[in-house]
Image: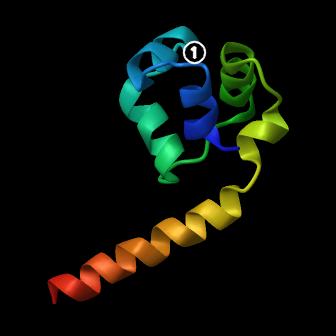
Amino acid sequence: MSLRSERKKVGLSQGDAAQLCGIRQQRLSHYECGIREPKLDVLKRLSKVYGCTIDALLENRDVEDRFRKKNVRRKIAKAD
């Protein structure tokens, strides 16, 4: 799973999840997109809100990040 999939599994919007965790929605978006990495205290709050382990939140992050970067490169290449 990932941050986004765990959030969706419990049926929360980004805004609602961010509010429950005490962070801004934009920051949660950045975590989900891989722009920023959440600190341990934020991961603890997210895991509590989502009802999962921190490991579940971090699982497959490397694979997802590589996939995301590959898609971004494709979009840039198409724009050229």
Image quadrant in which the C terminus is located = bottom left
How far across and down, in percent of the image, does residue 22 sit?
A: 53, 13
Q: Which residue is mark 1?
A: 21
Residue pictured at 77% horizontal, 49% vertical: 59
Q: Quadrant of residue 74?
A: bottom left
Q: Quadrant of residue 58?
A: top right
Total numbered labels: 1
Which structural element holds mark 1? helix
Please state if 44 lies on the left or on the right of 68 as rendered: right
Farthest residue, direction left: 80
Type of amino acid under label 1: Cys
In this rendering, the answer to whether 3 lies above or below 48 is below
Residue pictured at 60% horizontal, 19% vertical: 10
Q: As rendered, which of 56 and 19 lies closer to the eye? A: 56
Q: As rendered, which of 65 and 27 lies closer to the eye? A: 65
How far across and down, in percent of the image, does residue 66 sit?
A: 58, 71
Q: As rendered, which of 46 and 10 lies closer to the eye? A: 10
In this rendering, the answer to whether 67 lies above or below 22 is below
Please state if 41 lies on the left or on the right of 66 as rendered: right
Q: Residues within 10 Å of mark 1 (few under 14, many from 20)?
A: many
In this rendering, the answer to whether 76 lies above or below 13 is below
Q: Quadrant of residue 72?
A: bottom left
How far across and down, in percent of the image, does residue 31 sit?
A: 53, 42
Residue pictured at 66% horizontal, 23% vertical: 46
Image quadrant in which the N terminus is located = top right
How far across and down, in percent of the image, does residue 20 sit?
A: 54, 9
